[in-house]
Image (spheres, rainbow, N blue to C red):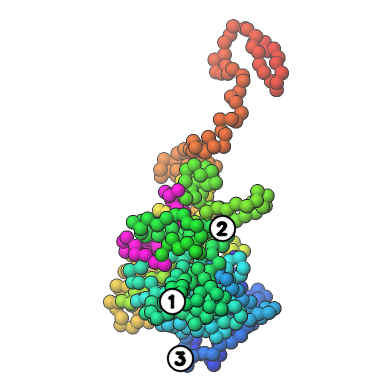
Amino acid sequence: TTDPRLVKVPSSKNSTKRPVFFSPEDYPRYVGYDRQVPEYFPANGQKSFEPIGYIPQPHEEETFAYLEETYGALNEKQLGIGESTCSGVFGAIPLGAPNGTALLSVDELTHIAMERATTAREAVQMMGSLAEQFGFYGAGQFEGTSESLAVSDTTEAWIFHILPDPTGKSCIWAAQRVPDNGFAVLANMFVIRQVDPNDTENFLMSKSVHQVAKEYNWWTSEQEDGLLDFTKVYSDGEYSHKYYSGRRMWGAYHLACPSCNFPADYVDLQSDPVYPVWTVPDQPISVEDLFRYHRYTYQNTPFDLGAAGNLAAGPFGSPDRWKAGPGEKQVGAGNWERAIGLYRTSDTYVVQSNKESSLGGILWFGPASALGTVFTPFVVQLESIPKSFSTGHQAVFSRGSAFWAACYAHNIANLKWSYAIQDLQARQDMLERKSILLMQQLEADYHGSQQDPHQDFRALVESAILANAADIVSSLWQLSDEIMFKYASGFVNEDDSHGGLSQMVGYPAWWLEAVGFKEGPPPPPTKPKCCNPPKDGKTTTALRNGSSGLMSAA
């Protein structure tokens, strides 16, 4: 139920205090006027959120504009942030709730960083410092009381981990820089291991990292225990089940660096660090590679969720495994593999920063599951995000919503996944490649004009980006209709332009064997005479409902 809307938060003049709001991790994520976002204004009887506290504003006259989904995603200085909820050994309750002690969630920390920070390093230090001062609370006991962020700019990328401290009034945080040629994976679990407080070029952290570890006798000193292992000390490991995080780490590294040949198995990911904090990919990674990684369901590996022979995937190889219901409760303990490409995702995005760009950073935003979405480019300079992307949510179906366009295409493809995924991937590839070429052309045109930047942006860039977004949403709805026609009622149907033929493709042989097709009803016992019966006048015996009777030939 996470709010899937993408909005632009405009630059605004600072007041002396900034209100801080509770983060519901639900729809609507915020209602009110403080953010100056029309999509957040109260409607249909909604009441504005009340602040749970305030923090001082800096002396700068204005905040930076940025793009926001649940978290701040990309600001006008090309600061980008991605989020992953994690387990942690401590939890805290937000102010405003009974026994609440902490003011700041990761949602609000990313918003503040977007408003104020120009670099990833500055953002990391800012978020950590504010959480130390005002307290940090996480999403909850199941999803985890702690958080990881990927924080990037045009020159650096950092991994940021944070959890409440034992008092619930402050926090414990650490950050590690990823080298320029590095590739790292965050998958709902801490990954930072040995932290070196003396290496400030590559590590930043709160003093509480070592103070609390000493207090709880989890670490004594570098001389006795070596550098403190942040994940081993402060992570509560994988949640939900073993491999929930580790399989995705293995999967992403398997795609980016197959030569590394990392093991797929381990004892306990928290205490058995079989995967590095980062690795060097075999080849430079493109945005198209990242789109593909986000759609990975371990195809062509032993863990392939849609593989032929995997009965759980059904006859047509669906990688989706729905959330548990009464049947799972009846059966008892059990789990499915957790894929990277997940059906219940509210949105997925890729941040592309480039210090040479005149357009600034690009947010490639994919509403709903990456499996059914098309990553669509937006830039912060846009006056606003199109309504199809800035409105809509899971509780109300809308054909005007990009979220529902992608969700619908994904679900329609499940009619015959192993067939329809070919159509879906072809459309995704076509539209995303078209968008990449468009942004390259817009960058060249805009960089080459620069007579009146504001007017040129509106004329050259904004109209093209908005038209492209509209085309993508329209194309997804059209694709759903095409898939419905093509695979309706178990057939593979071709339209008139392809001959108008319908193929009866049935089910795959392995599935027929698995479900006992050959043990079904036998052939009819009556010996057929059609369509040239004999004229010998002999009596024929027929079996009807288990009884025998005599029939005379006419």
Give percent across and percent down for residue 369. Answer: 50, 60
Q: Which sits in the foreground, 435 or 323?
A: 323
* Amino acid bearing label 1: Gln
Q: Label 1 belongs to which residue?
A: 223
Quadrant of the snapshot with the N terminus: bottom right
Quadrant of the snapshot with the C terminus: top right
Residue 510 seen in the figure: yes
Give percent across and percent down for residue 537. Answer: 62, 7
> What secondary structure prevails in the magenta region?
loop
Horizontal side, residue 63 vs residue 534: left or right: left
At x 61%, y 65%, the residue is 142
Find out whether residue 205 is within the magenta segment. no
Marks 1 and 2 close (CB-CB < 8 Å): no
At x 55%, y 75%, the residue is 217
Over which residues does the magenta segment extend? 277-302
Q: CA distance from mark 3 to mark 2?
A: 46 Å
Along the polypeptide, which appears first: circle 1 or circle 2? 1
Q: Is residue 61 above or below residue 550?
A: below
* Amino acid bearing label 2: His
Along the polypeptide, which appears first: circle 3 or circle 2? 3
Q: Label 2 belongs to which residue?
A: 241
Q: Which sits in the foreground, 199 or 357?
A: 199
* Amino acid bearing label 3: Glu
Q: CA distance from mark 3 to mark 1?
A: 44 Å
Q: Label 3 belongs to which residue?
A: 60
Label 3 sits on a secondary structure element that is loop
